[in-house]
Amino acid sequence: MLLSEGFRDTVLVCGEVAETEGDMMYLAMEKGIKPVIVKELGRELSWRDDWTAFWKIYNIIREVKPDIIHTHTAKAGALGRLAGMFYRLLRFARNDAPVCHCEAVGRSNLVLIHTFHGHVFSGYFGKIKTVFFIWVERFLGLFTDRIITVSENLKKELVEKYRIAPGKKFSVIELGFELDELFKLPQRENNEIVNIGIVGRLVPIKNHKMLFLAVRNLKAKIIVIGNGEMRAELEDYAGELGIQDRVEFRGWVRDLKAIYEGLDIVALTSLNEGTPVSLIEAMAAGRPVVTASVGGVADIVEDGKSGYLVESGNAEEFGRKLMDLIRDPEKRKNFGEYGRIIVK
């Protein structure tokens, strides 16, 4: 949306916001962009809804006649690029391809760009479905003019491990943030109980249960920021472990300062990540982190300096690293200060 300020017109096409998801459409509104809602454009696979969404997106493209289509996320990225490819094919067949008005692009056709903020090739689906999605992305990669990733590690995975497209098609553009308020936050003091926060959707890929296991014998409180399909299951799981009195579910919170000012440590237990926003925010707030070493995490966190990296799924080791920080306020402070330096 920040890039939209450099273009004549920007149209944002997206699906409806699920009841358990945080609504960020207000950010688009602040930039003067009114989202176009395609209600059939959901996360889950549905041949009927996906077919309808494809044609709706195509008709929007045909009406708007864009110079550039920039897609995000797996489902919307696939349908958006397929619709763009179909539009481009029909224009070429009629020999009336539109001239791109963006001099930086410098080509007489519709330009397709896709950004990977992460990927769904690990931790999301079974083997058959995962292989199918990899081949879909390889096919789409043939017709995508530029592929953007948010970290070098993510680019390396997509190029070398999954062979989505040649490296020359990729550009790395790290995420940008407005973190001034977080840089001003002081450390919490005189805290008899250490607050450990985890921020994100309550879905299987985020692996919240590992954090609950890791802290069940620790003197600490868990603050869960976010919502999602697993909330009731996680509440029950906390009860099974006997830690329900030490786990607080706060739902989605817009105010970053309100999230991090009450935390001493920030945890991330995901099975797969691109560039985790919560870790960047935590480090800007001067909070040490304990995180699963997945995806682009190692691009952000320096093990033993701004936090701890732990093998994904190792709840016992995760608990040991949390205990180390719980027992040592000075280390928490030093890790937090170093994290701020990295983010700045």
Image (tube, grey):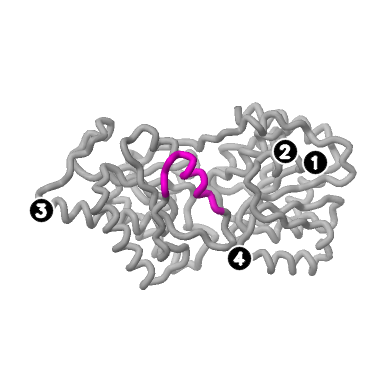
Q: Which residue is mark 4?
A: 229
Tag 1 residue: 325
Q: Is residue 27 left or right of residue 334?
A: left
Q: Which residue is mark 2?
A: 288
Q: Which residues are magenta?
A: 23-34
* Element type where label 3 sits in the image: loop
Q: Position of residue 201 (x, y in %)?
A: 60, 56
Q: Quadrant of the N terminus?
A: top left
Residue at (32% x, 51% y) in the render:
141
163 horizontally vs 297: left or right: left
Do tag 2 and tag 1 residues touch (Cβ < 8 Å)?
yes
Dot 2 falls on a residue whose secondary structure is: loop
Spot occupied by residue 216 in the image (x, y as percentages of width and height)? 81, 58
The Cα–Cα distance between marks 3 and 1, rounded to whole angstroms, is 65 Å
Question: Split into 4 quadrants, where in the image is the C terminus?
Answer: top right
Check disc 4: other Cα within 10 Å, few if <14, some if 14-19, many if 20+: some
Q: Write the residue at 55% across / 50% down.
A: 273
Does the residue at mark 4 contact the one at mark 1 (Cβ under 8 Å)?
no
Percent coordinates x, y for residue 296 in the rendering: 54, 43
Q: Is tag 4's residue or tag 1's residue first in the polypeptide sequence? A: 4
Q: Specify which label sits upstream in the sequence, 3 or 1.
A: 3
User: In terms of secondary structure, where does tag 4 sit?
Assistant: loop
Q: What amino acid does circle 4 point to?
A: Glu
Q: Between label 2 and label 4, give the one nearer the viewer.
A: 4
The label shown at residue 267 is none
| Label located before the other in sequence (4 or 3) | 3
